[in-house]
Image (tube, rainbow, N blue to C red):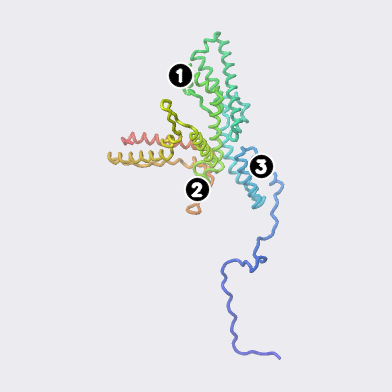
Amino acid sequence: MAIKASGRFVPPSAFAAGTGKAFTGAYAWNAPREAVGRERPLTRDEMRQVQGVLSTINRLPYFLRSLFTSRYDYIRRNKSPVHGFYFLTSTFQRRLWPRIERVNQRHEMNTDASLLFLAERDHYARLPGMNDKELKKFAARISSQLFMMYEELSDAWVDAHGEKESLFTDEAQAHLYGHVAGAARAFNISPLYWKKYRKGQMTTRQAYSAIARLFNDEWWTHQLKGQRMRWHEALLIAVGEVNKDRSPYASKHAIRDVRARRQANLEFLKSCDLENRETGERIDLISKVMGSISNPEIRRMELMNTIAGIERYAATEGDVGMFITLTAPSKYHPTRQVGKGESKTVQLNHGWNDEAFNPKDAQRYLCRIWSLMRTAFKDNDLQV
């Protein structure tokens, strides 16, 4: 028998308001998980592009090659091969590779100066990643070839003028220096007294001293090490390893080298003593060095004391002491900051790509601007 109810019914209670959080489940087995799906494989053309870009990376010096290959392997393992493909083709090939090529073009062998070392062009291109042992052999090879060139030119001069005494003249040595130093300029160096030679003011003594350096293995080793350091740092700047987020002033590799050299110098100073030959008294050399302006802390104190003294002198003379900050234009900066506050990020500055300016170029620009400012101060009778 059916039961019929009459009257009003109490409506059911409303659903509880959602918290906005995803349902996690009461147990581990019903917790939400990522959707199971198959990653899209690379097409044949994409695989060819990957192999082509990787072959380009393998031709780079080790410090750059390891940087890009490790990054590519990390993206491919933690994301997908497709993301790795986008990193190689979009980030490296389109954005970074043109900057690397521009830096290498600025530092490559100057064949316009001389073609004598054209056979060493490929070897010189490996200078940024060259170790010290290989670099010393390269320096010895350069000096020996220049010496052979000098000998051949000297013999030709004697054959043309008849006597060996004719070599010991300003004209002869300037002639020999011009050929030897001109060939050395292929390695992007400025030989000693080169400006005097161009002005026709070179003497025999100056030619001897300049040519002797070009025949010295140690001199070439020092020159090549300096070029290697600058070229190495320029490449790291080009790929974005020097910026506010990573390392604002220099690359981490350069900072490690500076600290290692300082530590080696300190260890050498600790092993040395100063001895008075008359009294036989001996003291540690490191104690005297740390008590002089060679100590960075003391050097900083003297700088601050000098600034304070200039400020006091300016106040007594009725002048104003101030700091002036000069900033280079954006084309001298390889990166730029985008956004404000916490959302500020660092991006590559494409306006830098055309010239690939280095810190030395920015320094020359600032020195030129400061010289123009001093000229303007002088023209307006302002004492600075």
Real-space CA distance between mark 3 and mark 1, rounded to the nearest whole angstrom = 53 Å
Q: In the shown orientation, is residue 37 left or right of residue 222?
A: right
Find residue 54 and name its label: 3
Residue sitting nearer the eye, 376 or 287: 287
Q: Is residue 238 visible?
A: yes
| Mark with earlier residue (3, 1) | 3
> Mark 1 — residue?
201
| Mark with earlier residue (1, 2) | 1
Mark 1 is on which residue type? Gln
Mark 2 is on which residue type? Gln
Residue sitting nearer the eye, 31 or 201: 31
Q: 189 above or below 57?
A: above
Q: In the picture, residue 277 is in which quadrant?
A: top left
Measured from the top left, where is residue 59 in percent x and y?
64, 37
The quadrant of the picture occupied by the N terminus is bottom right
In what element is the residue under mark 2? strand
Q: In the picture, residue 324 is in which quadrant?
A: top left
Measured from the top left, where is residue 365 in percent x and y?
45, 36
Q: Are marks 3 and 1 in contact (CB under 8 Å)?
A: no
Real-space CA distance between mark 2 and mark 3, rounded to the nearest whole angstrom = 30 Å
